[in-house]
Image: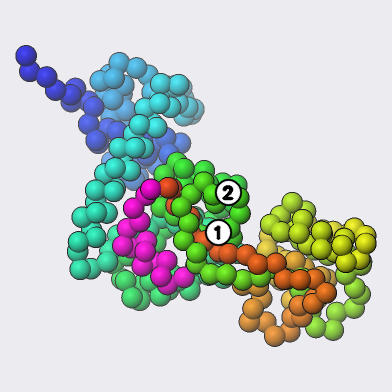
Amino acid sequence: MQSGLNPGLNLSNLKYFYDAVETESISESARRNFITQSAVSQGIQKLEKALGISLITHQRNCFKLTPEGQNVFFLTQQIFKTLKAITDVAQDHLDVVSGQVNIACTQSIAMNLISDALQKTKQIYPQVSVKMKIAKMENIGLLLKRGLMDLAVVVESEVCDQFDKHVVRKGFFHLYAKSGIQGNIDEGVFVDHSSGLFVDRLCEMYRKSCKKELKILQELDSWQVLAKCAQNGIGYCFLPDFLLCDDTSMLIVDSIKPIPYRIVAIYPKGVHLTRAAKALLELL
């Protein structure tokens, strides 16, 4: 007896489904695959018929996975990860470094570190393309786990322990102030978040040295905004040094000990980084 897969269960239909789920849009899946929306819908329907289950709720203007669709999407992710890994291994044997690197990072790292690396990559490795996603740290881990990004560049935190790590650079958090600023630390400081990286260490050091609590004047939700405030003399701002290392008008408050940090590239454990990804990391 001859056996074989139902013709509806093929890579094209799986790709239409995968892209539609990833973007939550039939039209976006059509754009990615250079076909019509109708062709995407028909491909998903063929996939459903081949599997004998409903993958999405077929309601007008509502794209939602069924429980079975969630399971199939997870397995489909593994298929396309494997296909990408096969392609990456083949690329490693070529003399020319090429391919696409999908990288996630925060806004501050994108503006102060990644932008220079992108320019160098374009000059040295013209056949490497970089797709960058700006996201908050709480979302970056999810992007990596879902396989939507190859790697991320972040300031190291406990979240990074879930992934393999490559140290990009090291530095220190300082309390910065504009030269000639009026006032003192006792009046309060500006931070990104009261629960932000190393803010608890800052408060602890102040408590030990001054025997009182450090007042947080405002949480600005962005290191980039904090750096701008420090440069404009708005007050004392707690920041990593990579944002202000070239600004000679800034003073470091030496009564607060510097707090070391590391910027790391993170990626799923056991994943083989492509030559293109490694080339980008070398330029950071």
Q: Secondary structure at mark 2?
A: helix
How would you rate the neighbour count of disc 2 (Cα within 10 Å): few for under 14, some for 14-19, many for 20 or more? Answer: few
Residue 228 place in picture, x, y as percent: 71, 71
Type of colouring? rainbow
Give the residue type that dot 1 points to: Val
Is mark 2 in CB contact (under 8 Å) with mark 1? yes
Quarter of the picture holding the N terminus:
top left
How would you rate the neighbour count of disc 1 (Cα within 10 Å): few for under 14, some for 14-19, many for 20 or more? Answer: many
Residue under label 1 = 154
Q: Is residue 182 left or right of residue 178?
A: right
Foreground: disc 2 or disc 1 = 2
* Distance CA(mark 2)–CA(mark 1): 10 Å
Residue 200 place in picture, x, y as percent: 77, 56
What residue is drawn where x is 37% and y is 64%? 278
Q: Which circle's residue, 2 or 1, is located before the other in the chain?
A: 1
Q: Is residue 112 visible?
A: yes
Residue furthest to the left in view is 1
